[in-house]
């Protein structure tokens, strides 16, 4: 996994609560058997008319946000289906950071597993970020969001910080506990 | 120290702890065709094996056609995914209930009916509705594909301990055939919201829960994820032990296990939950969802709400309701019973078990599906289908004009050919009414099996309390 240090980019404002993973990647695109190539399907039904013509009023189609790496979202982002394809699509499209007031649990976990940093911020901070048109800097090492004269710290579990900063393989990390797994299996029945 | 049921299961599965996280042992891993191919690829790429093939079970359910199984699968991409699962299970040595198996079905339907699901165990699956298995007192939750790979390789999962959430459900429903488990869980989600359970494991308790059958309890736990919870749990009781007795994968010395379960698997008196909610089921009405998330639900006797009333001063929620009504093609103030439907879907891991079909058949028997409605029944598994046919339910549905199909997830998520056309309106016994869930532009109303059956007959929603269901 690609390590995550610092990202500086304009932020794409997705002004909607309860965005579910069915919207992030509609089900007709879940049949691929690889992890790559999902970016073209990101927010597909909101982003494209029938026949694949971009919808002018959808924020991802706004030329101002074409090279954005940061997505601003609202409450309960990523709810619903556990499909990791949603995160693969965000990643493949180019997003490395999603900032919201809250995330659904499975989606939140899936982000870290793919080198995407989900950041929870209070309401007032999110409102401020939604109003900023200039670039936003997210620094994982210092846990700071800097933009337009503001500097806000954000929380992250130490486990995930380490995995993201170093781009670690968490299966290899778990396998370091092989002795304990074997020991557990010896006594655990069912 | 007094512990909750969740804490007991959690603590007994900790392999080790690190940085405030626990490495939990996984007792059963269920695998399906959509969220597993990339996980198996990851194993191959790193030269890893499946650690416990004996604890891993696979089936194909999400994109299988529900039409004649002797015909080839027309959709090439579905066929590729199904073949990939066959190949992966063979290569890694995993038990697979394939498309021709008498045990094929929706993963959350076959787990319990085969006794793979057992009290006190930990169960994971790359599917958010894994919470269903919590009805048996097992800690069961959905995971992403990276975690599927992690569990295949290590039989463990690294997690932060969720909080505990007690939902106490009290009161006797006046007409339990008309006001079902689906109506109870939809009513609860309506109250606590789609993020009401985020970060928690819910334990459903109270006299209403004790009265429910195992299949009804599964409906409740199934939709825990629609309230945002990691899992839903119900303490096992004699009904649970009876249900699992003699099932194919239930342990041989079953009575010894029952004694252990009976003694241990309950929340101690005096145990503290992080959060608590009490709900009275006594006077609830049949529920119908009107919007694009499961909390956007109301009584069948009510009207489509006005966004400003729904938002209760929260501008984001109000905006959400306005957009939802626009998508659903509904006007505020319309009586729910005036909403005319085009399609009916009875199926999904929420409501496709024998009891769901039996109850729906009571409404349908001797009647005809409205001429304007296309209605289908998709049993949750081959075993459900067989048992329903033994009771003659297939003929009741077919005589009324329903399609009687093969088992799978079908139109719950429309990954197979069973989809809504844009603008079509469906009374559905599934779990999600998200935009496009059942087909791009399709409009979903979540209801119970009896409500769906009655809507099929009448062509619009009706209050099933007015029908004779006994």
Image (tube, rainbow, N blue to C red):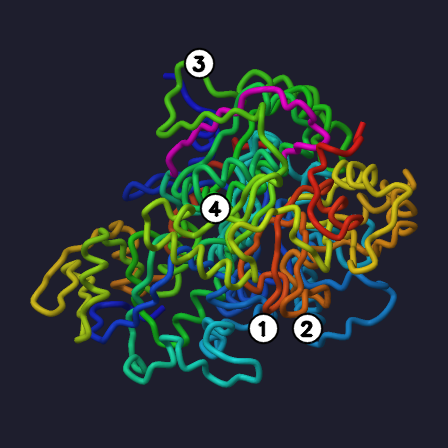
Quick one: SS at disc 4? strand
How far across and how far down the image is residue B409, in percent? 68, 55
Image quarter where the N terminus of chain B lies is top left
- Residue lying at 37% horizontally and 30% vertically, measured from the top left: B275
**Mark 4–mark 1 CB contact (< 8 Å):** no
- Frontmost residue, A176 versus B40: B40
| Residue shown at 73% from the left, 54% from the top | B344
Residue behind mark 2:
B80
Which residue matches tag 1?
A32
Residue receiving disc 4 = B156
Question: Which mark is nearer the camera, 4 or 1?
Answer: 1
The quadrant the C terminus of chain B occupies is top right
The span from disc 1 to disc 2 (Cα, nearest Å) is 9 Å
Disc 3 secondary structure class: loop
Q: Residue at x 73, y 48 (%)?
A: B455
Image x and y of residue A136, in percent:
18, 70
Q: Is residue A171 visible?
A: no
**Other-residue count near label 4 (Cα within 10 Å), few / some / many at <14 / 14–19 / ≥20:** many
Q: CA distance from mark 2 to mark 3?
A: 52 Å
Magenta segment: does it hold B459?
no
Residue A178 point in image, percent of width and height: 43, 47
CB atoms of marks 1 and 2 within 8 Å: no
Dot 3 or dot 4: first in sequence order is 4
SS at circle 2 = helix
The region drawn magenta spans B162-181
């Amino acid at each position: 996994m690609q390590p995550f240090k610092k990202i500086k980019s304009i932020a794409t404002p997705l002004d909607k609560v309860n965005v579910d993973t069915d919207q992030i990647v509609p089900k007709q695109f879940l049949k691929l058997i690889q992890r790559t190539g999902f970016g073209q399907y990101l927010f597909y039904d909101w982003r494209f008319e029938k026949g694949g013509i971009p919808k002018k009023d959808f924020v991802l189609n706004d030329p101002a946000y074409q090279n954005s790496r940061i997505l601003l979202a609202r409450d309960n982002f990523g709810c619903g289906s556990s499909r990791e394809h949603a995160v693969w699509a965000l990643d493949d499209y180019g997003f490395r950071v999603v900032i919201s007031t809250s995330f659904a649990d499975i989606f939140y976990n899936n982000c870290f597993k793919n080198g995407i940093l989900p950041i929870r911020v209070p309401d007032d901070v999110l409102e401020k970020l939604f109003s900023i048109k200039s670039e936003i800097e997210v620094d994982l090492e210092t846990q700071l969001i800097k933009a337009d004269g503001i500097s806000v710290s954000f929380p992250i579990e130490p486990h995930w910080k380490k995995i993201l900063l170093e781009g670690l393989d968490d299966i290899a990390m778990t396998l370091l506990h092989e002795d304990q797994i074997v020991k557990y299996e010896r006594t655990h029945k069912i | 120290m007094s512990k909750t049921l969740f804490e007991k299961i959690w603590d007994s599965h900790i392999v080790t702890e690190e940085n405030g996280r626990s490495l939990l042992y996984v007792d059963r891993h269920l695998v399906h065709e959509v969220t597993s191919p990339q996980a198996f690829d990851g194993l191959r790429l790193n030269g890893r094996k499946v650690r416990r093939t004996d604890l891993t079970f696979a089936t194909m359910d999400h994109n299988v056609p529900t039409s004649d199984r002797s015909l080839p699968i027309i959709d090439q991409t579905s066929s590729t995914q199904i073949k990939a699962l066959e190949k992966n299970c063979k290569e890694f040595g995993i038990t697979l209930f394939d498309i021709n198996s008498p045990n094929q079905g929706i993963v959350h339907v076959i787990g319990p009916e085969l006794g793979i699901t057992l009290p006190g165990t930990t169960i994971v699956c790359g599917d958010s509705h894994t919470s269903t298995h919590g009805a048996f007192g097992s800690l069961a939750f959905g995971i992403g594909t990276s975690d599927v790979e992690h569990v295949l390789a290590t039989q463990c999962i690294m997690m932060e301990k969720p909080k505990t959430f007690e939902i106490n459900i009290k009161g006797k429903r006046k007409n339990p055939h008309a006001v079902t488990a689906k109506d109870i869980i939809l009513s609860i989600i309506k109250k606590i919201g789609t993020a009401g359970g985020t970060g928690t494991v819910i334990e459903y308790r109270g006299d209403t829960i004790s009265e429910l059958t195992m299949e009804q309890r599964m409906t409740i736990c199934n939709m825990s994820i629609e309230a945002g919870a990691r899992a839903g749990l119900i303490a096992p009781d004699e009904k649970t032990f009876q249900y699992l007795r003699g099932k194919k994968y239930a342990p041989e010395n079953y009575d010894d296990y029952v004694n252990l379960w009976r003694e241990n698997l309950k929340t101690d008196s005096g145990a503290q939950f992080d959060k608590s909610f009490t709900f009275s089921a006594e006077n609830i009405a049949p529920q119908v969802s009107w919007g694009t998330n499961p909390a956007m639900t109301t009584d069948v006797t009510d009207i489509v709400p006005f966004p400003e009333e729904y938002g209760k001063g929260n501008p984001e929620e109000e905006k959400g309701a306005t957009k939802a009504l626009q998508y659903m093609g509904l006007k505020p103030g319309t009586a729910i019973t005036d909403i005319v439907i085009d399609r009916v879907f009875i199926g999904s891991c929420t409501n496709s078990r024998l009891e769901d079909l039996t109850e729906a058949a009571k409404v349908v028997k001797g009647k005809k599906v409205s001429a304007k409605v296309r209605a289908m029944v998709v049993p949750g598994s081959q075993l459900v289908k067989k048992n329903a046919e033994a009771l003659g339910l297939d003929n009741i549905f077919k005589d009324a004009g329903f399609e009687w199909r093969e088992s799978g997830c079908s139109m719950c998520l429309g990954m197979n050919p069973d989809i809504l056309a844009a603008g079509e309106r469906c009374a559905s016994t599934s779990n999600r009414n998200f935009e496009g869930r059942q087909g791009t532009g399709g409009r979903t109303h979540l209801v119970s099996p009896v409500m769906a059956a009655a809507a099929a007959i009448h062509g619009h929603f009706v209050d099933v309390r007015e029908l004779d269901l006994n």
